[in-house]
Amino acid sequence: MICSRYCYLGYITVGRKGIIFIDFDITLGSFYSVERYCPSGISAKLWHRTGLDGDPDLQFLLSGGDLLKVRSSNWKKTRFYKLREDCKTLWYESHKTVRASNPTFCVDDIATVRQGRHTEGLRKHTDDKVESRAFSILFKSRRKNLDLIASSEEEAKQWVTGLEKLMSNMGKLTQQQKTEHWIFNCMRKADKDRNNKMCLKELKSFMHHINIEVDDAYAQTVFEKCDQSKCGFLDGKEIEHFYEILTDREEIGTIYEKYAKTGGMMNAEDLLNFLITEQREAVDLNHALTLINKYEPDSSAKEKKMMSKDGFMMYLHQPECLIFNPAHRSVYQDMTQPLNHYFISSSHNTYLMEDQLKGPSSTEAYIRALLKSCRCVELDCWDGSDDEPVIYHGYTLTSKILFKDAIKAIKDYAFKTSEYPVILSLENHCSVEQQKIMAQHMISILGSALVTKPLGDQIPTGFPSPEELKGRFVIKGKRLNKLEDSFTTKANSTEDIVSEEEESGDDEEEEDQKPKESKTLKLAKELSDIVIYCKSVHFNGFEDAKDNLSFYEMSSFKEGKSVKLAEESANQYIHHNVDKLSRIYPAGMRTDSSNYNPVPLWNSGCQIVALNFQTQSLEMDVNQGRFLPNGQSGYILKPAYLRDRASEFDPITLTRGGWLQHKTFHVMVISAQQLPKVNPKKTSIVDPLVRVEIYGVNSDVATKETEPVENNGFNPSWNARFQFDVYVPELALVRFVVEDHDTTSSNEFVGQYTLPFTSIQRGYHHVPLVNKNGDRLPSAGLFVHTMILDDESQ
């Protein structure tokens, strides 16, 4: 019963003249002729392209096999796993008697597959001898890892290789392809009797699956309109007709008709007119011809250099037509500036998976943060048993992990997402003896990637650049002497007394300005010597820092202190951060690992604004949006006025200067597509509304929202127009958030997308949506139109 109006096979496209009825996910790159899934009278066509067709690893997954599932040293059980025919879902048997059916999970939900004993569970609960047969499936959500052991090394490799191929092909699909797959799967679920036909009851079930609530009268009307044979069910061409009604994008059709001036179609000149007028692109006719050749599915139209409505639809679903500027997907900023000239994606208490009182600590938390392009991670170090330092949140019930295991995980995953330097922020509570072990572990595990002396042969007078530090680790911590002393023959003691890190005194009241007696600890020379560019020192005021501190001596500020400085002394804070690094961390009272607003600190030039990456929050959405561009490198070059020692910029008073570039931002929220249910187990359909939020300097902060649309998460429409004034665009971020409206309680989160104002494309664009974890919702999105106008009076 599953059909497609047009389906995509790499560069092979089947348009309306060749309808394909499929039951095999096109992630494979091919379709199989499986007659039992095709409506009678319609023959399925077999198409191939270079890809996974006939791939032995894929065939292996489809056949399935027994794997040993590992949960603990005492819980290791054999389970049968296999890939379903949709090539998107993995099924495995469960012996739980309470289950109505065996569980499944989607390939889309997999974050990564690791071969070997590379999770805490496998290292703790299995022996070295199973190393070659072990592998793990890690998920994007907070779902627990799936630790597995195959019967042979060859089988383990086939599982890993096959799953990686599936994930890679899935990632190459366009948004429209993902939408079609989702619809096909919902159709399959609705076809209860598996007869490849759709009765009225099944049609209503299908509509519910795709998040549309329709009354009986409307469902009856749609059904009768498509049931041309008057036989009481839809089959073949009738299902095709229903699909066309369902997926018709009236709003895109209206745009197409406006510019299709050549016999009802777009020729290259028409398309060019659209690109220049609506999209504000500086392109020529050759570019329009390239788009037609690339995206037009109808061969006859392509030969005539024309773009059909289907081709136009396909073009608007391409990554280049998302709202995020495609030129910003790779590193495009100057990476040769000093390190302190960048905002640096930073994590607080990185080792925690949950709260700060009794939550688990895990090396997985470091891996997740690093894979999200975090470039500064924190390690709270304490004496452990067997002379091995441990990491945990001191004086709490949080679990402990070995320091050396954390360093190994950091080494393995530091440069998977970004090749730019990682800062290891040490909060050191260890004895001298275990500090020496910490130093030994970092030197032996990180090797030549660890910065153990200044770059070059001269005494440094400023920070090296991210480019110069590419692939390197920089230690932030206490140091016994000045960096300059390492260039002299002056003897240093093997240990000495230093004050503890600022965060160690987190119980102190910020409002109390009386001097406090600092806690101290003995510092081992071995650990001190590998602190090069980030020496931790206490902050005694801007003047003291300017007069007495070297460039590499940096302070950490509790959020309350830093927010106060940002509000009362923003310009001084900016000047301080032109020369030095500043790290901000959450207040100690945030035992639930909640977050603070990072925006005012960025506005004051603070580079290392550390957030709790383990906590889903609006603040983390904004943080991920800030670091979305520049290749997700974790480094964003600060605007010129935050790098200028003579800058007069103040984000509070906002006097005139080069930073003041008044823009009028027009955004029309047109529609949404395939919004997920907030709770899949509930029968209710979402009532979506869209809110557009602006973050930046105080004058730019604003929010506006649409009215809710009742009972339609599939294709709600608003056509709501909003206007915003943005005065400092280089610091502004735009957040699109979708919520399920509720009249009796708080609205529920559906999805969001945040990006810098300067990364917004003008014109008609789709906005992808991500879930609370920051992972892409495969089929969901918004369709908007944007305009950014300059203030001509400037």
Image (tube, rainbow, N blue to C red):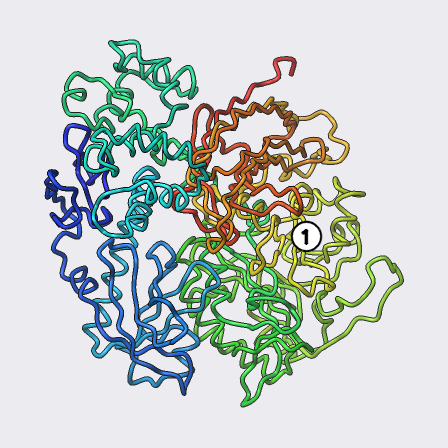
Front residue of 535 and 789? 789
Q: Residue at x 58, y 58 (%)?
A: 615
Q: For residue 578, say whether it is visible.
A: no
Classify residue 9 by image quadrant: top left
Q: Residue 491: image x %, image y %? A: 63, 75
From what the image shows, is residue 440 above or below residue 193?
below
- Left-right relation of 409 to 380: left
Q: Residue 314: image x %, image y %? A: 30, 30
Which element is circle 1 on?
loop
Identity, as a three-letter code, of the amino acid under mark 1: Tyr
Quadrant where the C terminus sits is top right
- Residue at the right extreme of this rendering: 514
Quadrant where the N terminus sits is top left
Q: Residue at x 19, y 46 (%)?
A: 29
Q: Residue 713: image x %, image y %? A: 47, 39
Q: Residue at x 15, y 25 (%)?
A: 299
Q: For residue 626, say whether it is visible.
A: yes
Front residue of 102 and 138? 102
Front residue of 581 and 372? 372
Callout count = 1
Q: Residue 78: image x %, image y %? A: 29, 79
Front residue of 195 and 595? 195
Give the residue pinned by disc 1: 596
Classify residue 661 by image quadrant: top right
- Left-right relation of 210 to 399: left
Instruction: Estimate how packed mark 1 is, as few (under 14), some (14 to 19) or many (20 or more) residues with alpha carbons within 10 Å.
Output: many
- Left-right relation of 172 to 556: left
- Left-right relation of 84 to 717: left
- Residue at the front extreme of this rendering: 231
